[in-house]
Amino acid sequence: MTIDDKTDPAIKTTEPKTAADVQGRSLDLPSNPVVVLLAILVVLAVLCLAYVAAEIVLPIVLALVLKLLFQPAMRLLEKLGFPRSLAALALILLVFGAIVAIGAAISGPATEWAAKLPDGIPRLQQRLKFLNEPVDTLQTFLHKVDGFMQQGSGANGGSGSTIAATLFAGTTHFAASFFETIVILFFLLVSGSTFLKRMVEILPNFKEKRQVVELSQDVERNISAYLVTITVMNAAVGLATGISMWLTGLGDPVLWGVTAFLLNFVPIMGPLLGICIFLLAGLLVIDTLWLALLPAALYLAIHIAEGEIVTPVLLARRFTLNPVLVIIALIFWFWMWGVPGAILAVPMLAITKIVCDGIRPLAAIGHFLSGDE
C-alpha cells in the first residue's frame, strides 16, 4: 500500500528521502530518556485501555473510519444544497438500509446451506477420507477438553441453555455496538469539524494553525481515497465471485458475492477462509471431483488478479506501507478486537503514517512505516 505525499506540497517538503535526512531530522526527537519512557508508557496505557474498554473504544474508532469513508458523499450532498444533518441522516439510512436489505436477501440461502450440512457430512467424509485420521485425533482431543470443562463447571444447567445464553448475549452485544457506532457516526458527520475549529482557535501562531489544517485535510483525503478504492474493488470481487459461482453450478450468487466482498476486507486471513468455504461448498453439492474444486480455484484466481494486479495499480501512487508492519498490525489488532480489528488495522496504520509525516519530530517514525517506493 502507498501513501502519496504529493497531495500536499507543504508536507512533501518535510518528508525525508535519504537516511541522512532521517538522521538529521531525528535530532528533533526527544533526547531526554525520561520523556521517551513516558511516551512509551502512554502508548502502552492507551493500548491497554483499547483492550479493556473494547466495547466502548471499538465503535468510536469504527465511526471515525466510516466518517472518513462517507466524507466525499457528504460533501457532494452539501453541494447539492442538503443541510448537514439531513445529509448525514440520509447517507446513514441509505448505507445501513442497503446492508439490512442485503442481509435479508442472503439469510434465506444461508439457512438452506446450513440445512444441507448435516446430510452432506457423510459425502464430505467420503471425499476427504484421507483426512479421517487427523480429524479423529482432533475430535478425541476436543471431547477430552469438553469433558474437562464440564467437570470444572459442574452440573449447572444443560448445554442447550448455555448455547442459547451465549447466542443471546452475542446478539445483544452486537446490537448495542451497532447502535453506538451509528449514533457516533451521525454526530461526527454533522459536527465533526468542530474539533478542528477548536484546535485551530487554541493554537498560538498562524504556522501551527496552518499545519494542523493541512494535516487534517491530508489524512481525510488519503484515507478517504484508500477506503473508497478498497470498497469499490471488494465490490468488484464480490460481483465477479457471484457470477463465477453461478456459472460453476454452485448457485446463490448473491450469497457468495456478499461473502467474498466481506472476506476481502480482511487481508490474508479473509481470502484463506474464503478458499476453504468455496472448497467445502463445491465438495458438498458438485458430483464431479475436478468440478467441485473449480469454485475455490476461480475464487483464488479472482483474488490474485485483484490483489496482485488491479488494486496495486490503483493504489501504488497513493499508499505504500511496510508490508511486514502491515502483517504485524493485522495480527495485533485481530488479537485486540477480533475481525473488526483486522479490518481497521491497515486504515489505522495509514493514518498513523500520515500524521507522523506531517509532524516534524515524528517524521522518522513515518519514514520507518513507509514501504519501498
Image (cartoon, rainbow, N blue to C red):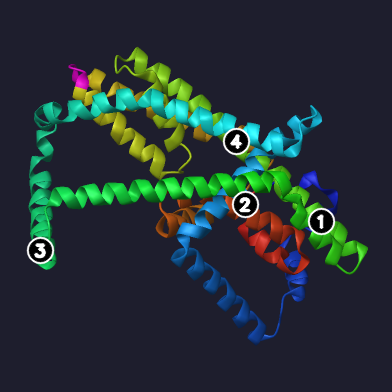
Residue 350, numbered circle: 2
Mark 4 residue crowding within 10 angstroms, few (<14) / some (14–19) / many (20+): some
Query: Separation of disc 2 and disc 1 at Cα?
Result: 24 Å
Q: Position of residue 277 (x, y in %)?
A: 30, 33
Query: Separation of disc 1 and disc 3 at Cα?
Result: 58 Å
What residue did someone put label 3 on?
Answer: 148
Image height of 231 relative to 362, above or below: above
**Most common secondary structure along the magenta stretch:** loop
Query: Separation of disc 3 and disc 4 at Cα?
Result: 47 Å
Query: Separation of disc 2 and disc 4 at Cα?
Result: 25 Å
**What amino acid is found at the position of numbered circle 2 in the picture?**
Ala
Residue 309, numbered circle: none
* Nearer mark to the viewer, of 3 and 2: 3
What residue did someone put label 1 on?
Answer: 197
Q: Quadrant of residue 155?
A: bottom left
The residue located at (37%, 25%) in the rendering is 106
Q: Secondary structure at mark 4?
A: helix
Is residue 29 visible in the rendered image? The answer is yes
* Nearer mark to the viewer, of 1 and 3: 1
Mark 1 residue crowding within 10 angstroms, few (<14) / some (14–19) / many (20+): few
What residue did someone put label 4 on?
Answer: 92
Q: Earlier in the sequence, mark 2 or mark 1?
A: 1
